[in-house]
Amino acid sequence: MTEKVITRCTWTQTAGNELSQLVQTRLFDEDVFVKPDLDDAINEERAVLFSDIDSPGIPCELQFQIAPSFKIAALTLVCSAPKVELFLGPSQEYLETIYGIAIDEDGGDVPIQPYRYDVEIDRSGIADIDLKLLTTGKDIFIYGAMLHIAPNPNGITTQLQTPFDLLKIQELLQRGGSSGSQKKPDEEKMQKFMSLMKGITTHSQSQAPALAADTSVIDVNQHIDSKFEELERIISKRLDEIEAQQNKKLDKIIAMLENRN
Protein backbone atom coordinates (compact mmCIF):
# COMPACT_ATOMS: atom_id res chain seq x y z
CA MET A 1 0.00 0.00 0.00
CA THR A 2 1.38 3.42 -0.95
CA GLU A 3 0.04 6.56 0.70
CA LYS A 4 1.65 9.98 0.45
CA VAL A 5 3.61 10.95 3.57
CA ILE A 6 4.73 14.51 4.27
CA THR A 7 8.12 14.43 6.00
CA ARG A 8 10.40 16.99 7.60
CA CYS A 9 13.63 16.91 9.62
CA THR A 10 15.10 19.73 11.71
CA TRP A 11 18.69 18.64 11.01
CA THR A 12 20.49 19.16 7.71
CA GLN A 13 20.54 16.28 5.25
CA THR A 14 24.10 15.57 4.13
CA ALA A 15 23.68 12.31 2.18
CA GLY A 16 21.09 10.00 0.69
CA ASN A 17 17.80 10.52 -1.13
CA GLU A 18 14.77 12.50 0.00
CA LEU A 19 13.37 11.39 3.33
CA SER A 20 9.88 11.04 1.83
CA GLN A 21 11.20 8.33 -0.51
CA LEU A 22 12.43 6.33 2.45
CA VAL A 23 9.15 6.23 4.40
CA GLN A 24 6.83 3.35 3.54
CA THR A 25 3.16 2.82 4.44
CA ARG A 26 1.42 -0.46 5.24
CA LEU A 27 -2.22 -1.21 5.98
CA PHE A 28 -2.64 -1.90 9.68
CA ASP A 29 -4.45 -4.97 11.01
CA GLU A 30 -6.77 -3.74 13.77
CA ASP A 31 -6.69 -7.08 15.59
CA VAL A 32 -2.95 -7.45 16.11
CA PHE A 33 0.18 -5.44 15.29
CA VAL A 34 2.46 -7.60 13.17
CA LYS A 35 6.03 -6.29 13.19
CA PRO A 36 7.52 -6.30 9.68
CA ASP A 37 10.65 -8.25 8.80
CA LEU A 38 13.82 -6.21 9.06
CA ASP A 39 14.44 -6.54 5.32
CA ASP A 40 11.01 -5.02 4.66
CA ALA A 41 11.54 -2.17 7.13
CA ILE A 42 14.91 -0.93 5.84
CA ASN A 43 16.09 0.18 2.44
CA GLU A 44 19.86 0.63 2.23
CA GLU A 45 19.65 2.34 -1.16
CA ARG A 46 17.37 5.04 0.26
CA ALA A 47 19.08 5.49 3.62
CA VAL A 48 19.42 9.11 4.71
CA LEU A 49 22.13 10.87 6.76
CA PHE A 50 21.39 13.98 8.82
CA SER A 51 23.86 16.26 10.61
CA ASP A 52 23.55 19.01 13.22
CA ILE A 53 25.90 21.40 11.38
CA ASP A 54 23.20 24.10 11.18
CA SER A 55 21.61 23.43 14.58
CA PRO A 56 24.29 22.31 17.09
CA GLY A 57 22.97 21.27 20.48
CA ILE A 58 19.38 20.95 19.23
CA PRO A 59 17.90 17.41 19.10
CA CYS A 60 17.02 15.99 15.71
CA GLU A 61 13.27 15.89 15.09
CA LEU A 62 11.45 13.89 12.44
CA GLN A 63 7.89 14.78 11.49
CA PHE A 64 5.56 12.45 9.59
CA GLN A 65 2.08 13.46 8.39
CA ILE A 66 -0.54 11.64 6.29
CA ALA A 67 -3.95 12.56 4.88
CA PRO A 68 -6.64 12.84 7.62
CA SER A 69 -8.67 10.11 5.91
CA PHE A 70 -6.12 7.74 7.48
CA LYS A 71 -4.66 7.43 10.97
CA ILE A 72 -1.18 6.33 12.06
CA ALA A 73 -1.75 3.20 14.13
CA ALA A 74 1.87 2.10 14.53
CA LEU A 75 5.42 3.00 13.56
CA THR A 76 8.51 1.03 12.65
CA LEU A 77 11.79 2.96 12.58
CA VAL A 78 15.42 1.90 12.16
CA CYS A 79 17.97 4.60 12.91
CA SER A 80 21.24 5.28 14.74
CA ALA A 81 19.62 7.06 17.71
CA PRO A 82 19.41 4.88 20.85
CA LYS A 83 16.45 6.76 22.32
CA VAL A 84 13.36 8.43 20.86
CA GLU A 85 10.65 10.67 22.30
CA LEU A 86 7.25 10.43 20.62
CA PHE A 87 4.80 13.33 20.29
CA LEU A 88 1.31 13.16 18.74
CA GLY A 89 -1.03 15.42 16.80
CA PRO A 90 -0.90 19.10 15.83
CA SER A 91 -0.45 20.10 19.50
CA GLN A 92 2.57 17.78 19.78
CA GLU A 93 1.32 16.03 22.90
CA TYR A 94 4.07 13.97 24.54
CA LEU A 95 3.27 10.25 24.55
CA GLU A 96 6.34 8.31 25.67
CA THR A 97 10.10 7.80 25.57
CA ILE A 98 11.26 4.62 23.83
CA TYR A 99 14.65 2.87 23.92
CA GLY A 100 15.57 1.19 20.67
CA ILE A 101 16.60 -2.45 20.28
CA ALA A 102 20.18 -2.70 19.01
CA ILE A 103 20.56 -4.55 15.72
CA ASP A 104 23.78 -6.54 15.25
CA GLU A 105 23.12 -9.50 13.01
CA ASP A 106 26.80 -10.43 12.56
CA GLY A 107 27.62 -10.22 16.27
CA GLY A 108 30.62 -7.95 15.62
CA ASP A 109 31.38 -4.31 16.19
CA VAL A 110 29.28 -1.93 14.15
CA PRO A 111 30.74 1.55 13.41
CA ILE A 112 27.31 3.19 13.60
CA GLN A 113 24.97 1.05 15.67
CA PRO A 114 21.41 0.83 14.26
CA TYR A 115 18.43 0.63 16.61
CA ARG A 116 14.97 -0.64 15.84
CA TYR A 117 11.66 0.76 17.11
CA ASP A 118 8.23 -0.85 16.75
CA VAL A 119 5.68 1.38 18.46
CA GLU A 120 1.91 0.91 18.49
CA ILE A 121 0.00 4.20 18.87
CA ASP A 122 -3.11 3.58 20.94
CA ARG A 123 -4.84 6.84 20.07
CA SER A 124 -7.65 7.49 17.59
CA GLY A 125 -7.44 9.93 14.71
CA ILE A 126 -3.67 10.57 14.81
CA ALA A 127 -2.54 11.71 11.35
CA ASP A 128 0.78 13.35 12.29
CA ILE A 129 3.58 12.46 14.69
CA ASP A 130 6.84 14.02 15.81
CA LEU A 131 9.91 11.98 16.77
CA LYS A 132 12.73 13.52 18.77
CA LEU A 133 15.84 11.41 18.13
CA LEU A 134 18.17 11.58 21.15
CA THR A 135 21.87 10.83 20.62
CA THR A 136 25.27 12.16 21.70
CA GLY A 137 26.55 12.03 18.12
CA LYS A 138 26.48 14.79 15.56
CA ASP A 139 25.11 12.55 12.78
CA ILE A 140 22.04 10.35 12.54
CA PHE A 141 21.40 7.63 9.99
CA ILE A 142 17.82 6.75 9.07
CA TYR A 143 17.91 3.24 7.60
CA GLY A 144 14.19 2.74 7.24
CA ALA A 145 10.77 3.97 8.37
CA MET A 146 7.32 2.46 7.99
CA LEU A 147 3.95 3.90 8.99
CA HIS A 148 1.24 1.34 9.70
CA ILE A 149 -1.97 3.15 8.77
CA ALA A 150 -5.71 2.45 8.89
CA PRO A 151 -8.85 4.29 7.77
CA ASN A 152 -9.57 7.14 10.15
CA PRO A 153 -13.24 7.20 11.26
CA ASN A 154 -12.78 10.78 12.49
CA GLY A 155 -11.01 12.00 9.37
CA ILE A 156 -14.09 13.24 7.51
CA THR A 157 -16.10 14.80 10.30
CA THR A 158 -13.10 16.58 11.82
CA GLN A 159 -12.33 18.25 8.52
CA LEU A 160 -15.80 19.74 8.12
CA GLN A 161 -16.56 23.18 9.43
CA THR A 162 -19.20 23.63 12.16
CA PRO A 163 -22.48 23.32 10.23
CA PHE A 164 -24.10 26.39 11.77
CA ASP A 165 -23.34 29.30 14.10
CA LEU A 166 -25.41 28.91 17.28
CA LEU A 167 -24.80 32.52 18.34
CA LYS A 168 -26.21 33.84 15.08
CA ILE A 169 -29.26 31.59 15.40
CA GLN A 170 -29.83 32.73 18.97
CA GLU A 171 -29.54 36.34 17.85
CA LEU A 172 -32.16 35.76 15.18
CA LEU A 173 -34.56 34.25 17.72
CA GLN A 174 -34.04 37.11 20.17
CA ARG A 175 -34.67 39.67 17.47
CA GLY A 176 -37.79 37.77 16.44
CA GLY A 177 -39.08 37.89 20.02
CA SER A 178 -38.66 41.66 20.38
CA SER A 179 -39.96 42.67 16.95
CA GLY A 180 -43.30 44.27 16.22
CA SER A 181 -46.43 42.63 14.88
CA GLN A 182 -45.63 43.26 11.23
CA LYS A 183 -45.02 40.17 9.17
CA LYS A 184 -42.33 41.62 6.90
CA PRO A 185 -39.51 41.82 9.53
CA ASP A 186 -40.10 38.18 10.45
CA GLU A 187 -39.89 37.15 6.81
CA GLU A 188 -36.67 39.14 6.39
CA LYS A 189 -35.14 37.39 9.41
CA MET A 190 -36.09 33.98 8.06
CA GLN A 191 -34.61 34.84 4.66
CA LYS A 192 -31.44 36.02 6.37
CA PHE A 193 -31.26 32.79 8.35
CA MET A 194 -31.73 30.61 5.27
CA SER A 195 -29.06 32.55 3.36
CA LEU A 196 -26.67 31.98 6.26
CA MET A 197 -27.43 28.28 6.22
CA LYS A 198 -26.92 28.01 2.47
CA GLY A 199 -23.64 29.90 2.67
CA ILE A 200 -22.32 27.69 5.46
CA THR A 201 -23.39 24.51 3.64
CA THR A 202 -21.60 25.61 0.47
CA HIS A 203 -18.48 26.46 2.47
CA SER A 204 -18.48 23.11 4.28
CA GLN A 205 -18.85 21.17 1.06
CA SER A 206 -16.00 23.11 -0.56
CA GLN A 207 -13.62 22.07 2.24
CA ALA A 208 -13.44 18.48 0.96
CA PRO A 209 -14.02 18.40 -2.82
CA ALA A 210 -11.76 15.38 -3.22
CA LEU A 211 -13.99 13.34 -0.91
CA ALA A 212 -17.31 14.28 -2.55
CA ALA A 213 -17.72 10.86 -4.08
CA ASP A 214 -17.20 9.04 -0.80
CA THR A 215 -20.40 7.51 0.47
CA SER A 216 -19.57 8.46 4.05
CA VAL A 217 -19.38 12.13 3.02
CA ILE A 218 -22.78 11.82 1.36
CA ASP A 219 -24.17 10.40 4.61
CA VAL A 220 -22.69 13.31 6.55
CA ASN A 221 -24.17 15.86 4.13
CA GLN A 222 -27.58 14.19 4.32
CA HIS A 223 -27.40 14.28 8.11
CA ILE A 224 -26.50 17.99 8.03
CA ASP A 225 -29.34 18.72 5.58
CA SER A 226 -31.83 16.97 7.83
CA LYS A 227 -30.59 19.00 10.79
CA PHE A 228 -31.02 22.21 8.78
CA GLU A 229 -34.58 21.26 7.88
CA GLU A 230 -35.39 20.40 11.48
CA LEU A 231 -33.87 23.66 12.68
CA GLU A 232 -35.80 25.62 10.06
CA ARG A 233 -39.07 24.04 11.25
CA ILE A 234 -38.28 24.85 14.89
CA ILE A 235 -37.44 28.48 14.17
CA SER A 236 -40.44 28.94 11.87
CA LYS A 237 -42.72 27.54 14.57
CA ARG A 238 -41.11 29.79 17.18
CA LEU A 239 -41.52 32.89 15.02
CA ASP A 240 -45.16 32.01 14.33
CA GLU A 241 -45.81 31.63 18.07
CA ILE A 242 -44.17 34.98 18.79
CA GLU A 243 -46.20 36.68 16.05
CA ALA A 244 -49.42 35.10 17.34
CA GLN A 245 -48.71 36.27 20.90
CA GLN A 246 -47.98 39.77 19.71
CA ASN A 247 -51.14 39.85 17.59
CA LYS A 248 -53.16 38.64 20.57
CA LYS A 249 -51.72 41.41 22.75
CA LEU A 250 -52.40 43.95 20.04
CA ASP A 251 -56.02 42.78 19.74
CA LYS A 252 -56.47 43.23 23.51
CA ILE A 253 -55.04 46.75 23.34
CA ILE A 254 -57.33 47.65 20.42
CA ALA A 255 -60.32 46.22 22.27
CA MET A 256 -59.50 48.25 25.40
CA LEU A 257 -59.17 51.43 23.35
CA GLU A 258 -62.51 50.75 21.64
CA ASN A 259 -64.21 50.24 25.02
CA ARG A 260 -62.88 53.55 26.29
CA ASN A 261 -64.23 55.32 23.26
Image (tube, rainbow, N blue to C red):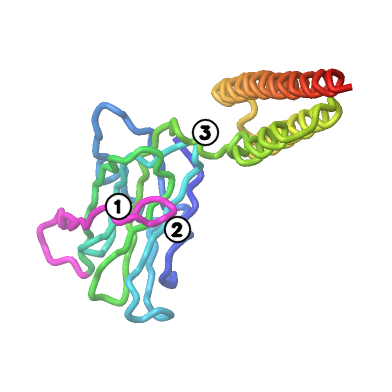
Q: Are marks 1 and 3 in contact (CB under 8 Å)?
A: no
Q: How far apart in space, not on screen, are marks 3 and 2 (Cα)?
A: 30 Å
Q: Kindly identify the residue that appears in the image at 51 percent across and 38 percent down.
A: 158
Instruction: Inspect the image, locate mark 1, and give the three-letter code of the amino acid beneath it.
Output: Leu
The quadrant of the picture occupied by the C terminus is: top right
Q: Which mark is residue 259?
A: none
Magenta stretch bounds: 87-111
Q: Are marks 2 and 1 in contact (CB under 8 Å)?
A: no
What is the secondary structure assignment of the residue under circle 1? strand
Question: Is 4 in front, or is 246?
Answer: 246
The quadrant of the picture occupied by the N terminus is: top left
Instruction: Inspect the image, locate mark 2, and give the three-letter code of the amino acid beneath it.
Output: Leu
Instruction: Inspect the image, locate mark 3, and give the three-letter code of the amino acid beneath it.
Output: Thr
Q: Which mark is residue 19?
A: 2
Q: Quadrant of residue 93?
A: bottom left
Q: Quadrant of residue 103?
A: bottom left
Residue 24 location in percent, x, y? 41, 45
Question: Is 240 in front, or is 202?
Answer: 240
Q: Which mark is residue 77?
A: 1
